[in-house]
Amino acid sequence: MKKCTVLVLLVLVVLYLTGCGDENSGETPTVGIDTLTSDSDWTGGVERPQGFDFSEARVRYADINLFESTIDLSIDVLTAGNVATGAAFTLYGDRPFIRDMGLVSLEDVSEAPESGYVSYLINMVAGHTYCVVTAEGNYAKLFIMDMDWGNYEGGIPYAWIKFQWQFQPDGGRVF
C-alpha cells in the first residue's frame, strides 16, 4: 500500500513538472498589465484601430468591419484643431461598455456595477479604475497606471495608456 501511494505521488509530481499543471493548461489569463496606443492599421485602405480584447487577453487591431469587431475598447486622441488635448476610451458599436469608478485602486473594486455604463467617449484619467462590459457580455476592470498624449513632430496626434486589468470570464460581476 505504501509503495502504491509513493508511486501515485511520484506520477503527480512528474505530470506537474512536465507542464500538466494549471500554469500551462492553455486557459486565458484573468489578470495582466498591457499598453494600448492610438495607433491604427490601414491594411486594405480601411482604418483598423488598435484595441484590447479581454477574452483573448491581448492588444490587437479591430476587425475590418468596425461595428462587428470584438475588441472591447480602444483609445482616441482628443484634439482642439490638430493639437492633442487628452485621450478617451472609445468603442465601435452602440452597446454601453464602460463606467468610471473614480480614483480607486483595482483591488478596491470587488464587483462591477449592474448599471451606469455609457457607450460614448469617456475621458481617461491616470489613477482611475474603470469597469467594462466586454463584447461577449462579460465584465472586466482596468486601472490606468500611466498615460500620455501629444503630437508627433509632423503634427499627428498620439495617445497611449499603460493599464493593469482583471477579466471575469464566467459572466459574473464579482472579481
Image: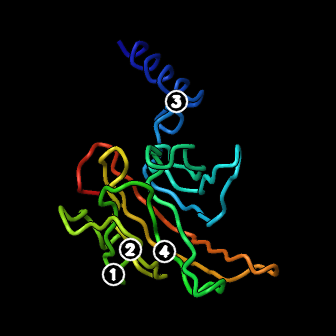
Label 2, on which residue? 129
Quadrant in the rendering for residue 68: top left
Q: Nearer the viewer, mark 2 or mark 4?
A: 4
Say left or right for 35 vs 133: right
Q: Are marks 1 and 2 in contact (CB under 8 Å)?
A: yes
**Structural distance between the alpha carbons of marks 3 and 1:** 42 Å
- The circle on residue 42 is none
Residue at 52% x, 55% y is 52
**Structural distance between the alpha carbons of marks 1 and 2:** 6 Å
**Structural distance between the alpha carbons of marks 2 and 3:** 36 Å
In front here: 106 or 23?
106
Amino acid at dot 4: Ala
Q: Is residue 134 above or below residue 115?
A: above
Label 4, on which residue? 88
Label 1, on which residue? 102
Q: What element carries label 1?
A: strand
Q: Position of residue 147 (x, y in %)?
A: 58, 78
Quadrant in the rendering for residue 152: bottom right
Pointer 3: residues within 10 angstroms few (<14), some, or many (20+)?
some
In front here: 44 or 160?
44
Amino acid at dot 2: Thr
Pointer 2: residues within 10 angstroms few (<14), some, or many (20+)?
many
Q: Are marks 3 and 4 in contact (CB under 8 Å)?
A: no
Query: Of label 3 and label 4, which has the lower sequence position?
Result: 3
Amino acid at dot 3: Tyr
Label 3, on which residue? 16
Q: Is residue 114 above or below residue 81?
A: above
Query: Of label 4 and label 1, which has the lower sequence position?
Result: 4
Residue at 31% x, 54% y is 139
**Structural distance between the alpha carbons of marks 3 and 4:** 44 Å
Query: Of label 2 and label 4, which has the lower sequence position?
Result: 4
Amino acid at dot 1: Gly
